[in-house]
Amino acid sequence: MDNGRDIRDDRAAGRLGAWAGDELLGRIDYFVLDDDGTGAGSALVAVHTVVEPDHQGEGVAGALAGALYDLAASESRSVVPLCPYVAAWSVKHSDRAPQPDPALTDRAKERLSADPDMW
């Protein structure tokens, strides 16, 4: 729970959502990039952040970005921030947001390029 918000991971939908009761305040869409055995590891790949208009400016996106990094760390995964918001957040919060292996970033971009309709 963060400032009255409940952060929920819906892995099947590839969505990390911030909720206040039954109201969705915002979300980060992501996909899981599994370990390919090359030593780069696995990652949660952030591709899109959306905050509902009535909740912009309330810190929802930042709470979601922090929660995504916490979730990845709890699973021993990296975060590949392909979403511009999450990428900017990671620069501002480098103490909480380690940079992913460049090989993971390349693989994430290739996967998204191969299936642009997935997000």
Image (cartoon, rainbow, N blue to C red):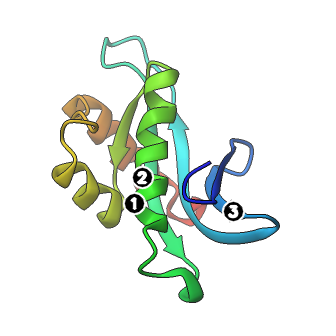
Cα separation, mark 3 vs mark 2, equals: 14 Å
Which residue is disc 3 drawn over? 19
Element type at mark 2: helix
Cα separation, mark 1 vs mark 3, equals 14 Å
The numbered dot on residue 65 is: 2
The extreme right residue here reads 22
The label on residue 73 is: none
Residue 28 lies, in percent from the top left, at 53, 59
Q: Nearer the viewer, residue 92 or 117?
A: 92
Residue at image position (47%, 43%) is 68
Residue at 30% x, 19% y: name it: 40
Query: Circle 1 is placed at which residue position?
Result: 62
Circles 3 and 2 in contact, beta carbons < 8 Å: no
Question: Of residues 104 and 79, which is closer to you in this image?
Answer: 79
Three-letter amino acid code of the residue under disc 1 = Gly
Disc 2 versus disc 1: distance between alpha carbons? 5 Å
Say whether marks 2 and 1 touch (CB < 8 Å). yes
> Regarding mark 3 in the picture, which secondary structure is present there?
strand
Query: What residue type is disc 2 on?
Result: Ala
Q: Give neighbour class at mark 1: few <14, some 14-19, many 20+ (Cα, 10 Å).
A: some
Q: Residues within 10 Å of mark 3 (few under 14, many from 20)?
A: some
Vertical relation: 98 (above or below) 26: above
At a point 31% along the width and 32% down the height, the residue shown is 104
Mark 3 or 2, nearer chain start: 3
Residue type indicated by callout 3: Trp
Seen at 41% across and 80% down, the residue is: 57
Q: Earlier in the sequence, mark 1 or mark 3?
A: 3
The quadrant in which residue 18 appears is bottom right
Q: Within the image, what quadrant is residue 102 found in?
A: top left
Local packing at callout 2 (Cα closer than 10 Å; few below 14, some 14-19, many 20+) is many
Q: Position of residue 3 (x, y in %)?
A: 55, 59
Q: Residue furthest front?
A: 3
